[in-house]
Amino acid sequence: MLLAVFLLISLCMKFSTPKTLLDVYVTGKDDPKCGKYMQNHLKPVLRIKYVRLLRANFTEDNNGLSDSILSNTLCTPKTNNGYNSSLAKYEFDCKTIGQESTEMPNWFIFAVGTDQQMMSSQIEYRYNHDAMGMFQYLKPEEVMAQQFTHASHLHIRYLNMTFNNKPSVVIDYNCLDTYPDSLIADHGLYIRKSNETMHTRLYFDPDSVGEKFPRPVLI
């Protein structure tokens, strides 16, 4: 009997799938340093639709410097939009293409969308309508009646990741440290290095492994 139990536990450990979880906290209007720039976290206009965690290998070839994607982890909301407004917190479940790892990813990609009408730019990136669902909220004829406000930014305050029970965190309690690149002001795809808090607009959303980022895109 004991042998059977031992074998069952061993099989479960051998074939269990490594689990990646991600919680993203955003800065609210009540923050003493950055609140005046923030959207209302109780009813946000900009929302994080999904996040990618990329692990890459630095390469140099005839096309210049690039990062080749070794693993691609897609994090999608746990429930509905995954957002808890009282905590200003997103909760994501993640699934990885490629080799799982407990190490911090090299890059984060944040897909930021909206679920209400807003002043915005055109969609000029690899758009996934199933995840973003924004066409009904980007009506040019309604933009003229809107007024710009500076209190409409999204700021990622805290990333809490768990890679197969190994925790990792990235903290940015003060949006002014890397202002204005710490703030997200519009829908789109935004990339940042794992150990930095500055975001760069991205037009390419890799959905598999083996693809490459040219280095100038990541500066």
Image (tube, rainbow, N blue to C red):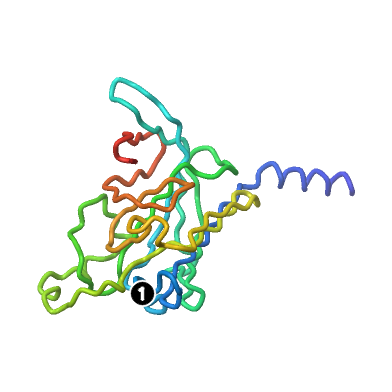
- In the figure, 129 relative to 139: above or below? above
Near-viewer residue (165 or 45): 45
> In the rendering, at what x and y percent does residue 180 appear?
32, 58
- The residue located at (43%, 70%) in the rendering is 33
- The residue located at (48%, 59%) in the rendering is 172
Q: Quadrant of residue 38?
A: bottom left
Q: Residue furthest right?
A: 1
14 vs 156, left or right, is right
Q: Residue furthest top?
A: 62
184 vs 119, left or right, is right
> In the rendering, at what x and y percent does residue 136 appear?
21, 70
141 vs 218, left or right, is left
Provide the secondary structure element on which disc 1 rests.
Answer: helix
- In the figure, 159 relative to 202: above or below? below
- The residue located at (63%, 49%) in the rendering is 164
- In the figure, 214 relative to 12: above or below? above
> In the rendering, at what x and y percent does residue 60 appear?
37, 23
Q: Quadrant of residue 51?
A: bottom left
* Three-letter amino acid code of the residue under disc 1: Lys
- The residue located at (34%, 71%) in the rendering is 37
Which quadrant holds the C terminus?
top left
> In the rendering, at what x and y percent does residue 143 appear?
14, 73
